[in-house]
Image: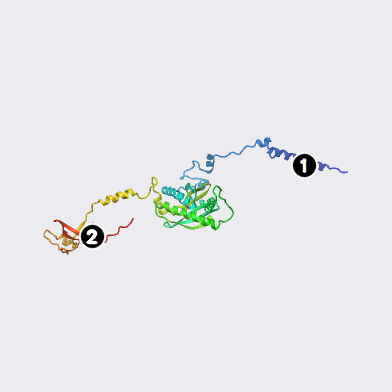
């Protein structure tokens, strides 16, 4: 005959009570499969902070000035916000690059290509190197005349678009992106050809400002091997967008400020309009006026060097013997420069000089 003890009955009752309490707690917290229950409907959405509240939390609001004490968080945040000088002429150079690239890339791809500038900004080299979206190809090039380096980044979308266009891909189909594998030799070769075209156009963009040759150095896929400057140094970044109908991608040009230092004074100049450099109108006008300029020419028969005491002793009636004869040659000078040699004669009751030969003129140094 089976039976239960009072201790067993009490334990079963306690388990039943605990199970009921857990069930009620689940119902109250809304952990149920009934989506129409009041518990689910009563949940309030989390409030989103606005921009003013975010700025206040990060310390971007009207806080203490530069000369006053700031908190540690404000110093950390403001350490990356460095203002660099604006280079107006460099923006014109990049605008010229866009126009030249639009033509050269159309000839390179035999397709309709549109090139545009997304933005031009200044930032630290290390911050940009850590923000490069991979996979990508990083081309290191050297500015020969400036003896420094620059960086060009071709993103994955542009790489596969160029490969697809150059190898005869059909229009109307998006470029296929294959991730998780290294770039093949064919892909690297085709991208190098694209980089050579862009570097040639970049050199042509600087021609009105100064002659410069950008030479391709190497192609990298790891940003650590493309370090051309200190991570804390400032640099100028130009983001270009290249569209080929339904294909395309981004190309970024990074020029450290140390690379642009030799032409910094030229890049700081302000120019209005598209035309800059020498003015052909003034060149023609100056040349025409030079042809009409009067020049005094002296005929020198002889020159002598005398002591100052002899010069002071000269008086009316004194004679100076010249080392010249009636048929001795004379020199024709303009200022201190001897232009011609000739002989003195007479022409219609006037003294005249017949030019025999031209002397060697000094070379004028080119500016």
Residue 234 visible somewhere in the drawing: no
- Quadrant the N terminus occupies: top right
Answer with left or right where residue 358 lies relative to residue 81: left
Q: Which class describes the residues within 10 Å of circle 1: few (<14), some (14-19), or many (20+)?
A: few
Of residues 58 and 140, the one nearer the viewer is: 140
Query: What residue occupies the far left of the structure in this picture?
Result: 317
Answer with left or right where residue 45 lies relative to residue 273: right
Q: How is the image coloured?
A: rainbow
- Residue 184 position within the rendered picture, expressed as x and y whole percent measured from the top left: 55, 57
- Residue 33 position within the rendered picture, expressed as x and y whole percent measured from the top left: 70, 39
Which of the two discs, 2 and 1, sits closer to the camera? 2
Of residues 54 and 159, the one nearer the viewer is: 159
Q: Residue at x 44, y 52 (%)?
A: 201
Q: CA distance from mark 2 to mark 1?
A: 128 Å
Residue 261 visible somewhere in the drawing: yes
Q: Which class describes the residues within 10 Å of circle 2: few (<14), some (14-19), or many (20+)?
A: some
Count of marks, rendered view: 2
Tag 2's secondary structure? strand
Of residues 244 and 218, the one nearer the viewer is: 244
- Residue 259 position within the rendered picture, expressed as x and y whole percent measured from the top left: 44, 54
- Residue 334 position within the rendered picture, expressed as x and y whole percent measured from the top left: 23, 56
Label pair 2/1, CB-CB below 8 angstroms:
no
Question: Which numbered disc covers residue 96?
Answer: none
Which residue is disc 1 drawn over? 15
Tag 1's secondary structure? helix
Which numbered disc flags the more N-terminal residue, 2 or 1?
1
Question: Which numbered disc covers residue 340?
Answer: 2
- Quadrant the C terminus occupies: bottom left
């Amino acid at each position: 005959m089976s039976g239960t003890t009072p201790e067993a009955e009490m334990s079963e009752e306690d388990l039943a009570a605990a199970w009921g309490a857990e069930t009620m707690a689940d119902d109250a917290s809304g952990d149920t499969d009934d989506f129409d229950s009041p518990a689910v409907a009563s949940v309030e959405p989390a409030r989103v902070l606005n921009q003013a509240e975010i700025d206040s939390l990060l310390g971007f609001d009207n806080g203490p000035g530069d000369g006053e004490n700031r908190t540690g968080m404000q110093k950390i945040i403001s350490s990356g916000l460095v203002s660099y000088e604006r280079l107006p002429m460099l923006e014109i150079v990049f605008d010229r690059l866009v126009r030249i690239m639009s033509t050269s890339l159309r000839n390179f791809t035999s397709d309709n290509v549109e090139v545009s500038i997304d933005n031009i900004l200044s930032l630290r080299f290390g911050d940009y190197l850590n923000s490069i979206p991979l996979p990508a190809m990083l081309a290191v090039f050297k500015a020969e005349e400036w003896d420094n380096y620059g960086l060009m980044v071709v993103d994955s979308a542009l790489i596969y678009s160029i490969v697809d266009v150059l190898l005869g891909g059909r229009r109307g189909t998006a470029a296929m992106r294959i991730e998780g594998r290294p770039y093949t030799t064919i892909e690297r070769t085709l991208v190098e050809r694209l980089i050579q075209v862009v570097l040639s156009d970049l050199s042509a963009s600087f021609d009105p400002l100064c002659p410069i040759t950008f030479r391709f150095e190497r192609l990298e896929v790891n940003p650590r091997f493309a370090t051309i400057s200190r991570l804390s140094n400032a640099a100028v970044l130009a983001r270009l967008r290249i569209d080929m109908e339904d294909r395309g991608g981004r190309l970024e040009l990074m020029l450290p400020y140390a690379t642009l230092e030799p032409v910094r004074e030229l890049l700081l100049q302000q120019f209005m309009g598209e035309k800059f450099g020498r003015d052909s109108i003034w060149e023609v006008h100056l040349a025409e006026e030079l042809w009409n300029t009067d020049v005094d020419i002296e005929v020198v028969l002889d020159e002598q060097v005398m002591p100052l005491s002899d010069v002071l002793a000269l008086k009316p009636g004194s004679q100076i013997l010249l080392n010249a004869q009636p048929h001795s040659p004379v020199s024709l000078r303009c200022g201190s420069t001897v232009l011609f040699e000739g002989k003195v004669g007479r022409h219609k009751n006037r003294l005249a000089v017949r030019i025999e030969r031209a002397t060697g003129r000094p070379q004028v140094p080119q500016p």
